[in-house]
Image (cartoon, grey):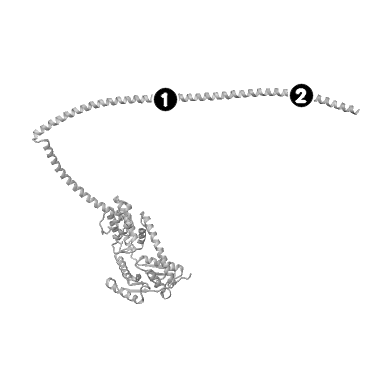
């Protein structure tokens, strides 16, 4: 029974499986057919779509080709039109050229005919002139050459007479005009320059806040004031004048050094001989820098460029020099301006004239002063520092110590005279006074062993500082006597001159 059931179950399973397979096969077959049909339908649709797109693309490409072809045709037509226009223009120009050639040919023919007529008339005129000349020769009894010579001689005599008269008139008028113009130029030049008058000054007043400072400047037993006088070469006068100390010296540079040194010492408060010497040395260096700066500013103000540094330094030194009581820098600037104005009036080189005027007195301010006139020395310095020959000649010739070879030289000479010779510009007494004191110092400086010399008290005292290692005490006394004797023999001076020889021994060491 059980076996039967199992067999029945197996049969049932097999039958069910067969039925299921049959059903599945029918279903799959139907689905496959449907899918193939649908795929064929979609393929036909896609093919139709692609064909449509291809037709549209071909249509667009055809349209583009047609449009490009039309554009090329239009360009070709335009080019053909331009070529036709150019051909027409060329034909018109050719026609015009042909017309002009024809006109020129006609004009040439007319001119040729006129020339032939003119030649014929000239021949007729020459024949008539020859016939008339023969008739004149027969009437006058002279040949043509003889008549021409007589006529020329008479005309020459008449021309000489008239020319001589005309030349005399022109010369007289030129002299009158030249004098008038020269005076006018000089007057205009003087009127356009205003300047200061001379000031005789051999002292500087140093102002202090209180009279207590005077004692500190004098120092114990006068050692500070003696050290200051020895270091600067300036006489320092401390009297009852309230809140003032007088610095007396003929040399403006020394006075300025003493003034600046005193100013720094009073501000610092430390006043003793060693400090005084240190400050004086520092002030001298500062003053040298100021001199160079003054020279640079002056050159810039005057518009003079390209000067050698040593010439600039000399121009700066002019600030502390005077010529017959007239400040030398002011005189140089004034002369330069006068030269520029006069050169402009005469139509000459203004820059060269101003340069020569500014440099004309540099021979008065060298560091060493050889026995040469300042004009020759200035020219020598200018040549040494590569100034142009016409500038050098203007400097050398402004006192007529050499021949003038440039047009600037007489202008510099005239303007120097205008600046120095006008009323109040200079005073002779100051120049003679300064020269006497310089000679006094130079006389003592010539002795061996002398380090520095200072003329003070208006030349009534000469202080001579000697090297302690070069001269002993006995020789110092003898030196004082020798200098006094030489001054008596060689110099002229008022009153008496006191010669003071100073010999100091110093030992200096440094702790490091």
Q: Residue furthest front?
A: 3
The x, y position of residue 3, in whole percent, is 89, 28
Classify residue 259 by image quadrant: bottom left
In the image, residue 319 sits, relative to residue 458, either above or below, namely above
Judge by depth and name the residue closer to the eye, 511 or 179: 511
| Number of the label disc, if any, that sits on residue 489 | none
Residue at disc 2, secondary structure: helix
The x, y position of residue 311, in whole percent, is 35, 58
Distance Cα–Cα, label 2 vs label 1: 83 Å
N-terminal-most mark, 2 or 1: 2
Which residue occupies 29% across, 25% down? 103
Q: Residues within 10 Å of mark 1 (few under 14, many from 20)?
A: few
In the image, residue 156 sits, relative to residue 510, either above or below, namely above
Observer-side mark, 2 or 1, equals 2
Horizontal side of 160 relative to 189 (left or right) equals: left
The x, y position of residue 405, in whole percent, is 26, 54
Judge by depth and name the residue closer to the eye, 73 or 327: 73
* Residue on which the image places disc 1: 83
* Residue on which the image places disc 2: 27
Q: Residue furthest bottom?
A: 474
In the image, residue 99 sits, relative to residue 334, either above or below, namely above
Judge by depth and name the residue closer to the eye, 397 or 58: 58
Q: Residue furthest right?
A: 1
Which residue occupies 16% across, 30% down? 125
Horizontal side of 218 relative to 460 (left or right) equals: right
The x, y position of residue 94, in whole percent, is 35, 25
Which residue occupies 50% across, 24% down? 69
Q: Are marks 2 and 1 in contact (CB under 8 Å)?
A: no
Residue at disc 1, secondary structure: helix
């Amino acid at each position: 029974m059980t076996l039967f059931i199992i067999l029945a179950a197996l049969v049932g399973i097999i039958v069910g499986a067969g039925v299921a397979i049959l059903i599945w096969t029918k279903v799959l077959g139907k689905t496959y057919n449907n899918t193939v049909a649908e795929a064929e339908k979609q393929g036909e649709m896609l093919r139709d779509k692609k064909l449509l797109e291809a037709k549209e693309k071909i249509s667009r490409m055809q349209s583009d080709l047609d449009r490009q072809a039309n554009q090329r045709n239009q360009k070709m037509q335009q080019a053909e039109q331009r070529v036709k226009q150019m051909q027409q223009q060329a034909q018109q120009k050719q026609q015009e050229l042909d017309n002009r050639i024809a006109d020129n040919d006609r004009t040439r023919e007319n001119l040729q005919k006129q020339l032939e007529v003119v030649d014929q008339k000239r021949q007729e005129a020459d024949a008539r002139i020859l016939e008339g000349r023969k008739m004149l020769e027969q009437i006058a009894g002279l040949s043509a050459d003889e008549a021409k010579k007589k006529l020329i001689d008479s005309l020459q005599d008449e021309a000489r007479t008239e020319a001589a008269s005309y030349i005399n008139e022109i010369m007289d008028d030129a002299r009158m005009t030249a004098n008038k113009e020269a005076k006018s130029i000089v007057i205009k030049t003087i009127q356009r320059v205003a300047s200061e008058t001379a000031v005789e000054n051999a002292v500087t007043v140093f102002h202090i806040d209180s009279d207590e400072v005077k004692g500190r400047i004098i120092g114990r037993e006068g050692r500070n004031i003696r050290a200051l006088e020895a270091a600067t070469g300036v006489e320092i006068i401390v009297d009852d004048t309230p809140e003032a100390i007088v610095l007396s010296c003929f040399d403006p540079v020394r006075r300025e050094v003493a003034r600046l040194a005193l100013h720094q010492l009073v501000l610092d408060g430390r006043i003793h001989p060693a400090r005084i010497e240190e400050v004086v040395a520092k002030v001298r260096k500062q003053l040298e820098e100021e001199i160079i700066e003054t020279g640079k500013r002056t050159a810039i103000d005057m518009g003079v460029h390209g000067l050698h540094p040593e010439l600039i330094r000399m121009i700066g030194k002019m600030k502390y020099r005077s010529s017959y009581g007239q400040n030398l820098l002011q005189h140089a600037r004034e002369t330069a301006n006068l030269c520029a104005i006069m050169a402009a009036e005469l139509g000459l080189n203004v820059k060269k004239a101003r340069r020569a005027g500014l440099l004309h007195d540099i021979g008065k301010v060298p560091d060493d002063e050889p026995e040469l006139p300042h004009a020759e020395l200035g020219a020598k310095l200018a040549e040494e520092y590569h100034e142009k020959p016409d500038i050098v000649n203007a400097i050398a010739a402004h006192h007529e110590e050499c021949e003038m070879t440039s047009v600037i030289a007489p202008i510099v000479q005239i303007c120097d005279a205008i600046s120095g010779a006008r009323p109040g510009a200079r005073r002779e007494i100051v120049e003679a006074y300064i020269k006497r004191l310089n000679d006094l110092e130079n006389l003592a400086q010539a002795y061996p062993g002398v380090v520095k010399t200072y003329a003070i008290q208006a030349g009534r005292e000469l202080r001579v500082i000697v090297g302690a290692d070069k001269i002993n005490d006995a020789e110092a006394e003898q030196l004082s006597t020798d200098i006094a004797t030489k001054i008596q023999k060689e110099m002229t001076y008022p009153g008496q001159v006191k010669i003071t020889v100073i010999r100091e021994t110093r030992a200096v060491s440094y702790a490091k």
